[in-house]
Image (cartoon, coloured by chain):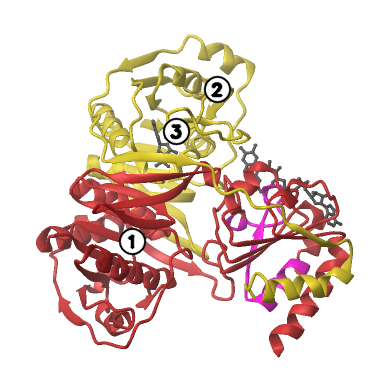
Chain colours: A yellow, B red
């Protein structure tokens, strides 16, 4: 089985965001980067599938040279091969997906995993965009996945409930938390990660469809009111919610 | 001249609340751009919802009906939406950033080679351009974004845009049939389980969210009772989700749901940066925590520094009194 996983590198979730000098993106100074948390579920699902069916796993990422670190994180978890579409340009979701589709076309995997969303731009676009560029079926925000032969049954999260979706291979899946518990790399994995190959490619598409005009921080709230220290403050809280904030 | 299409989401032929928000915003945007706006409904009985949309001022509703469209299918819906845009020359498409909209939007945008601004919280017109505002880094920053392709798509965060009724009017109705074959249904929803009593945090107007301060799952009823009185959704911090007290569907935060309700009540939640990221755009935030230095107080509008076990029951009673009057 050929299994592909698309992964992105994002600032650590504890990052205090500062706007950079260009006024359009964050200041990278002092930011540490991690694998996008949802992509860990995607990697884990790929590894589980390989353990069950055999085959090869490959991760693909579009980004700067520094993304190799994140690819090696996936290696350490157990992924076999990596491809980096190397670019210093800020590509939007549309462009990222076009590049991923072009790489994936050559590999022709049976299944392609994504995270449900990158926790930087929170776009939730790249998986279904890529599926459409490849003319493939897809299920997004998956919390449970079963593959029997070429039949795919997935549970997908929707507002207030779940959908049970059926499809068939090849398919694109985007992973939601709950799908599995990502493994921690062991020492052997970390050692092996150093020698696994990362193939570099040039971007095939850079014609963004969106342009960031400006970035700013949300209005800091003016310091809130502490109304009291015990239950006697409750009536005042309720009054303020009704009369001042007018939310009840 | 621009021509706007509002894609309206339905479930069991009922328009979702976010659908009314989308149609309202389309009508509003059309006024500003001095252009036309129409709505698209897809389903097995799409026609039934047309008149209801008229209340929001839309002049025309396009209905695409087919027995097989009673449930969502990513490929079939995308084909229909893209076909309609091509046939009728729509160049601004609005939809909601719901589970369905997030899945559908990118597919349609790929078909139409259109840029899509996702999960937008504000739209404005500047020099004829539609500028979208959207949170990034789970709300730690905000960007203004412009779409450079000729067709422009925007998915609107639910609960942010107003659904505004105007005077009653009956919209023109056009039934369009789009040919669909088996491959268009390569992904098929077979079963939907939705709990009707529970309000999902992503859609809730008021959220009561609990954290580790509740000490154990057996105390969560305190949160649920307050939520019930307020007609609110129940949320949770990751700590309590990871501990298995609550399902992940309730988690609020950077790796949970991003929410912006009118009122967010955080009880026994410390306010870690990843939690704040998911709820800091709430209109009014109330925090109850016994630690006066808890970071949640840094973004709360109102706070009580105290014990949840003492305060929550009193708060529930007080709201009960207020709301029964
Ligand atoms: C990659 C990553 C992603 C994450 N994503 C999320 C996310 O999406 N959402 C999220 O919530 N977290 C997320 N976290 C976790 C986050 O860092 C915190 O660990 C978590 O939010 C803490 O939950 P809590 O506030 O319930 O618990 P705690 O931090 O333990 O806080 C409990 C609070 O309850 C108060 N308390 C205790 N007893 C009482 C009492 N009797 N009365 C009143 N108050 C009391 C305490 O003073 C304390 O402030 C993420 C972390 C990482 C590393
Ligand atoms: N630059 C990238 N390279 C490879 N995969 C990506 C990239 N950006 C996003 N993805 C994948 O697409 C998913 C959704 O990202 P997004 O649409 O940006 O929220 C992520 O979880 C990744 O699996």
> Within 8 Å of ligand 1, the CB of disc 2?
no
- What segment carries the magenta color? B222-250
State the quadrant of the C terminus of chain A: bottom right
Residue A29 - label: 2
Q: According to the image, label 3 marks what residue?
A: A25
Q: Position of residue B320 (x, y in %)?
A: 74, 82
**Label 2: chain?**
A
Vertical placement of B17 versus A39: above or below?
below
**Does A146 appear above or below A225?**
above
Check if mark 2 and mark 3 are on a common chain. yes
User: Residue at position x 63%, y 21% from top?
Assistant: A186
Q: Position of residue B166 (x, y in %)?
A: 35, 82
- Residue at position x 43%, y 33% in the image: A53
Q: Is residue B260 visible?
A: yes
Q: Secondary structure at mark 1?
A: strand
- Residue B21: horizontal and vertical position, in percent? 39, 69
Q: Residues within 10 Å of mark 3 (few under 14, many from 20)?
A: many
Q: CA distance from mark 3 to mark 1?
A: 26 Å
Q: Does B35 sit left or right of A42 as displayed?
A: left
Q: Is residue A143 left or right of residue B20?
A: right
For residue B22, which quarter of the picture?
Answer: bottom left
User: Which numbered marker is on residue B95?
Assistant: 1
């Amino acid at each position: 089985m050929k299994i592909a996983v698309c992964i992105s590198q994002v600032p650590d979730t504890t990052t205090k965001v500062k706007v950079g000098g260009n006024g359009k993106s964050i200041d990278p100074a002092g930011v540490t980067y991690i694998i996008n948390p949802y992509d860990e579920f995607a990697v884990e699902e790929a590894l589980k599938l390989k353990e069950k069916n055999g085959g090869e796993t490959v991760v693909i990422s579009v980004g700067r040279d520094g993304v190799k670190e994140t690819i090696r994180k996936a290696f350490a978890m157990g992924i076999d091969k990596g491809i980096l579409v190397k670019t210093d340009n800020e590509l939007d979701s549309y462009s990222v997906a076009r590049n991923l589709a072009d790489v994936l076309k050559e590999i022709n995997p049976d299944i392609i995993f994504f995270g449900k969303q990158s926790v930087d731009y929170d776009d939730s676009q790249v998986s279904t965009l890529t599926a459409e560029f490849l003319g493939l079926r897809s299920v997004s925000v998956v919390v449970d996945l079963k593959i029997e032969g070429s039949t795919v049954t997935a549970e997908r999260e929707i507002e207030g409930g779940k959908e049970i979706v059926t499809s068939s291979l090849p398919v694109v899946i985007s992973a939601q938390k709950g799908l599995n518990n990502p493994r921690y790399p062991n020492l052997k994995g970390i050692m092996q990660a150093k020698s696994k190959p990362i193939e570099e490619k040039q971007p095939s598409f850079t014609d963004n469809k969106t342009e960031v005009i400006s970035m700013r921080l949300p209005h800091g709230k003016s310091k809130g009111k502490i109304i009291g220290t015990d239950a006697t403050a409750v009536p005042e809280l309720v009054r303020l919610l009704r009369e001042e904030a007018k939310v009840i | 001249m621009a021509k706007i299409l509002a894609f309206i989401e339905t479930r069991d032929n009922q328009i979702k609340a976010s659908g009314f928000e989308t149609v309202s915003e389309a009508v509003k945007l059309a006024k500003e751009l001095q252009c036309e706006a129409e709505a698209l409904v897809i389903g097995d009985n799409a026609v039934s919802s047309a008149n209801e949309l008229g209340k929001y001022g839309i002049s025309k509703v396009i209905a695409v009906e087919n027995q097989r469209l009673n449930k969502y299918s990513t490929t079939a819906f995308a084909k229909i939406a893209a076909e309609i845009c091509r046939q009728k020359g729509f160049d601004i498409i609005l939809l909601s950033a719901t589970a369905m909209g997030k899945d559908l939007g990118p597919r349609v945008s790929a078909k139409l080679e259109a840029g899509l601004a996702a999960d937008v919280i504000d739209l404005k017109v500047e020099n004829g351009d539609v500028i979208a505002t959207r949170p990034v880094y789970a709300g730690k920053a905000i960007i203004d974004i412009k779409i450079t392709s000729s067709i422009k798509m925007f998915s609107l965060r639910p609960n942010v845009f107003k659904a505004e009724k105007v005077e009653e009017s009956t919209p023109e109705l056009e039934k369009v049939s789009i040919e669909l074959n088996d491959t268009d249904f390569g992904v098929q929803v077979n079963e939907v389980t939705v709990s009707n009593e529970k309000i999902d945090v992503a859609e809730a107007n008021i959220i009561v969210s609990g954290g580790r301060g509740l000490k154990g799952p057996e105390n969560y009823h305190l949160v649920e009772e307050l939520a019930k009185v307020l007609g609110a959704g129940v949320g949770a911090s990751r700590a309590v989700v990871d501990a298995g007290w609550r399902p992940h569907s309730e988690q609020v935060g950077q790796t949970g749901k991003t929410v912006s309700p009118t009122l967010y009540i955080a009880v026994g939640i410390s306010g870690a940066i990843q939690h704040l990221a998911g709820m800091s755009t709430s209109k009014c935030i109330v925090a109850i925590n016994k630690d006066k230095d808890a970071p949640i107080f840094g973004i709360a509008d109102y706070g009580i520094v105290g014990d949840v076990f003492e305060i929550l029951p009193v708060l529930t009673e007080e709201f009960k009194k207020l709301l029964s009057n």
